Amino acid sequence: MPDLLAKILHAVTAHSYTPIKAKPLFRRLNLGEDAYPEFRRTVRELVRTGRLAVGRNNTIRPADPHGTVTGTFRRTSAGHGVVRPHPVDGTFKPDVFVREDKTQDASTGDDVLVRITREATTIKDAAGEVVRVLGRATRTFVGTYFERDGEGLVRVDGTVFSHSVSVGDPGAKGAKPHDKVVIEMLRFPSPDGRGEGVISEVLGPHGQPGVDTLSVIRAFGLPEAFSEAALAEARQVADQFSEDDLAGRTDFTHDLVVTIDPPDAKDFDDAVSVTIDPKTRHWVLTVHIADVGAFVRPGGALDAEARKRATSVYLPGKVIPMFPEVISNGLASLQEGKLRYVKTVRMEFTPNLQKGHVQFFSGAIRNRKRFTYDEVQQLLDGLAGGSSPSPPAGGVGEDRTPPADPDVRAMLRRMRDLALLLRKKRFRRGALELTMPEAVLEYDADGRVSGAHFAEHTLSHQIVEEFMLAANEAVAEHFTRHEVPFLRRVHPAPNEDKLEAFARFADLLGHRIKRPQDRFELQAVLGKTADQPERAAVHFALLRSLKQAAYSPVQDEHYALAIQNYCHFTSPIRRYPDLQVHRLLDRWLKHGTASADVEELTALGDHCSKMERRAETAERELVKLKILTYLAGRLGERLDAVITGVADYGFFAQAERFPAEGLVHISSLVDDYYGFDEDAHTLEGKRTGRRFRLGDRVRVEVARVDVARRMLDLRLADLPPRRAADDEVPSYGRSPKRRGGRRS
């Protein structure tokens, strides 16, 4: 009840307020007797979250004048905590550093109440101490089981806890040493206590094929099996589907339509067609998107399951879909040669790329050809002549292009030309393109990782990207123009101080930015470094300076794309927000009007944003886990790398051609004593003057891998390794002051 909350806070924080008990405060607000239960609940919540306090004689007063905030806790690899405060009235406060002995038993992801002990300044971060944990992110964790002194223990994966967790007598649930297990936390570890849990599931021996994937699925609480009701509903709609039923749909089945997807894709939710109007010479871009809403009844079992999942999760070697396969890989998937239902956006562009007439349809298509990105790239490389506004990617040499009929080749040329024009226009309006290459794992015949590389982002990828961006923008502009609330994809502008910090960072690498708020200056730096050794450092630094994109009905810009109105419409098989937008468009097409409840959209947007971040984090975690497992068997392997971060305890280096980043600890730099220059992001030798700076290229070798803690230690390849003392363990990012053995 936001109005009541605001009234209570306004009354209690007024200058003339004298602390009084709850009942007199309620009477002073003149709310009516029936509002008292809600008043009591709101006051309790305000006290619980630290915005109000209870004084002597149970009087209600403002919170501690030293200040408290609520936020999300994250534990660092050094054992300390960082709390990101929740926004209040749209205002974000700076992160709060919490020393390890002040974290209580908070765990990463928990909501906590923090008392501020030092306000943030231009020089120092804010500092505080955890007062209490308000809500647990999870009580379920995955780790490795071991035994010591007649006790069963579990070392939780990652750096969530410093201590291992006691799970009682040895052999619970049949667990054996080195098994991966799932535990339910009964008492969370604290700086002074081990914590206590109970084993709920034994996943299998560490290193056994599939156990790593299962570990990540359990650790992130990812859903697997669909409910019987959802599966039954999917089978029912499959039985009812008829390719002859085109009632209320525009027939596009005779149009030349193609899909372009990765080679291992199974769900195809977008198809495209590009023509040139013979009379006006306008480009006509038609984007067809799988009409999932035709098979998923709002409020039904399928819908409830999809809404809860909010997104498909793409793990290495495994997909956890948002819909059962009969929908995602069958009925809704735009398979080659099959009649499929679609929601269609048709856009006209003048020769100089002014947007003309835009139309929307409920339609049906028959996909002429299912292409992979590589096949399209080979065809584009083989195309000679044409009206390309810039040379196609690749060269023209031996004809190794896949077969395609003349009509398809001609359309691919049009697609290339239009996409390059749209891309050029997008950058002219100030769009930013961060080059963050995706890791691609390579497997042997037994399904084990045999290597990894960075994915290529070729012209064929850019074609699909530009057309999807255009369709998403067209739908968002339509609903905005007609004042229909919808779930937008927003990316708020970054804080100016973050951009100022990035500008100082870039300047250290020789890239001067006079006006950090000028997106064209940022764009220029990104372009200059896109193929340079410092690319990873620069592009990732800017990414960290930006806010996260999210789903919200509140109108806001998409900063990176440099557009005011944007939504996700083009992937309803794998994203629930797209399905919500489809349903709005369907109502508009049928009735000429549509509406939605803004509060419900806000809650849905928050949920979908959270599930999206969970899916992305789980994917990164499993990729990192598999890469580290691979490197654990390749100690001593040498890699060319670029320094991506510098600290007083060493520097981080990202391999140039292999998707792995590790720490070169300062203790391994045995040729000199190195001092840290924080402003220059540099380690410099006191005697030799040798420097390690952000963006420098270095030759490193794999020194140590700790798979359980997700840590990779590197050392310089041209320095002799120092033999560690028996009791010395590399600190993996901890301050050199805390170089002692790791606690179990």
Image (cartoon, rainbow, N blue to C red):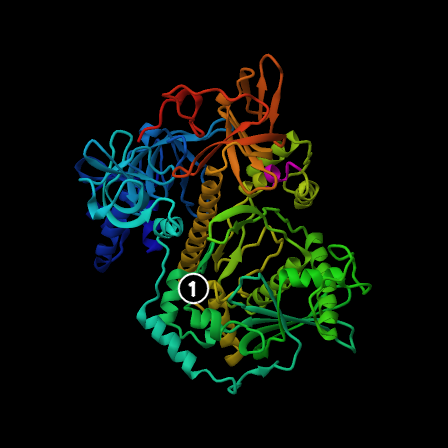
**Is residue 442 depicted above or below 693 in this figure?**
below
Relative horizontal placement of residue 468, taking residue 489 as reference (left or right): right
The secondary structure type at the circle numbered 1 is loop
Q: Is residue 8 left or right of residue 360?
A: left
Give residue 701's position: percent from left, percent from top.
Answer: 55, 31
Q: Is residue 534 on the magenta stretch?
A: yes
Give the dominant element type of the magenta stretch: helix, strand or loop. helix
The quadrant of the rendering that contains the N terminus is bottom left
Residue kind at label 1, given as amino acid type: Met
Range covered by the magenta-colored residues: 533-539
Q: Could you say which quadrant of the image residue 682 lies in?
A: top right
Q: Residue at x 44, y 48 (%)?
A: 622
Q: Position of residue 399 (x, y in %)?
A: 76, 62
Q: Is residue 260 above or below residue 736?
A: below
Residue holding disc 1: 322
Residue 260 in picture, x, y percent from top left: 61, 65
Residue at the top extreme, as displayed: 687
Outermost residue toward the front in this view? 445
Nearer the observer, 394 or 447: 447
Can the viewer see residue 213 in this picture? yes
- The residue at 35%/53% (across/down) is 221
Q: Residue at x 64, y 34 (%)?
A: 506
User: Magenta includes 415?
Assistant: no
Q: Is residue 275 left or right of residue 146?
A: right
Depth check: give the residue in front, 693 or 611: 693
